[in-house]
Amino acid sequence: MTVSFEEYAALARQLSAQHHAGQQHAAAESARRRDLHAAADYLQQRLTAQGQRLDQLGRAIGIDQPPAAPPDPNAGPGTGSPGGTAAWPGPGAGQETGKSGETTAWPAPPSAAGAPTVPGTGDGEPDGAAGAPGRSGVGAYPRLPAGEARLALPTAVSPAGGGVPAQRAAVADPVVELELARRMADEADRHGQQAELLAQRPALLPTWSPLARAVAVYAGCGAAAGVLVLMLVLASGVGLVDGFTLGAWICAGLPAVAFFGGYLVLGRWGRPAMVAGTPPRYLPLGFLICFLVVPMAYCAYLLMVRGLR
């Protein structure tokens, strides 16, 4: 059967097209893997930054990271139970692994004629290296025919003890997983921003501006001092406090107490958990308010008494 030149040319073009398509597929797969690696690196950086920011938020509100659990000194390497590694059974001996990770060995049954039993597959054939004397470290595995060995599938032992074929896990699409991780990272960023906004608000009057908060605090402390002024005036009226002491407390003592009280309140409850620098406390304004409110309260009391007379 002869092949013409046109057929050779068509076959060559077909092979060239297949080769070109394979190169394009390989390039596209390589670009896809690069994009996946870049997206994974970017998500890793975002998660690292989020972890650092969460640590800062925890330190700001007074929550320390829990210490890592120390390793168990009684646990031996490669075993799930304390006490170290169990000895491997000799030839012909079986083994059984429990739920706790301990390995239990049972002796091999003796032969009917009293001769030593040679481990095998159960069909009278020796077990190769596992059945040789002095080779107890080699495990005995059943030997399957060539056809069955190629078709054999890995099996998982169920808790009931029967050999059941293990269910293969569904292959996850990396693109879908990265998209889910990105959405979760976006959600974490949103909650982190909300937490930062809440952390930047003080516990005292959080929705007020710093100036309005300072005015309210100093005015409240001055009003409390004004109540004390009225009490001192009443005490002076019954002769418990003399005039000099009353004047000293009205002009200097109670205004100073009100000013320092407002200063301490702003420093304790007017300071946000997370803030860059020290928030303003408006000391001149507080001094002016406190040293005006107390004398004004005394003057208001005098006017009220004269009006009642």
Image: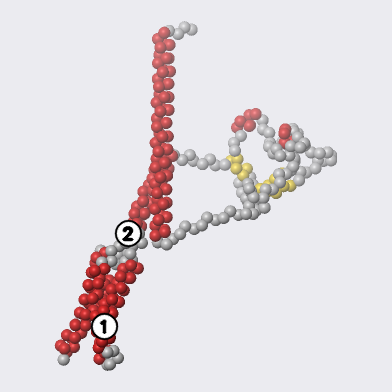
State the residue at coordinates (42%, 43%). Answer: 177
The correct choice, above or below, for 196 with respect to 235 in the image is: above
Residue drawn 32% across the image and 59% down it: 277
Taking depth in this image into account, of 244 and 104 the one nearest to the observer is 244
Q: Amino acid at mark 1?
A: Ala
Q: Amino acid at mark 2?
A: Gly
- Tag in front: 1 or 2: 1
Which circle's residue, 1 or 2, is located before the other in the chain? 1
Q: Is residue 228 left or right of residue 182?
A: left
- Residue under the point 31% across and 68% down: 266
Q: Which mark is residue 248?
A: 1
205 shown above or below 54: below
Q: Position of residue 244 (x, y in %)?
A: 26, 87
Q: Quadrant of residue 212?
A: bottom left
Task: Mark 1: give few (<14), some (14-19) or many (20+) Cα within 10 Å.
Answer: few
Residue at left offset 39%, top offset 60%: 60
The x and y percentages for residue 302 are 19, 86
Say which residue label 2 marks.
Answer: 277
Give the quadrant of residue 178: top left
Left or right of residue 302: residue 134: right
Disc 1, disc 2: CB below 8 Å?
no
Front in this rendered view, residue 57 or 112: 57
Return the residue found at the far bottom.
Answer: 238
Residue 20 versus residue 306 in the image, above or below: above
71 and 262: which is toward the camera? 262
Say whether residue 52 is visible. Answer: yes
Q: Is residue 184 visible?
A: no
Q: Which mark is residue 74?
A: none
- Measuring from the top left, give residue 252's x and y in whole percent: 26, 79
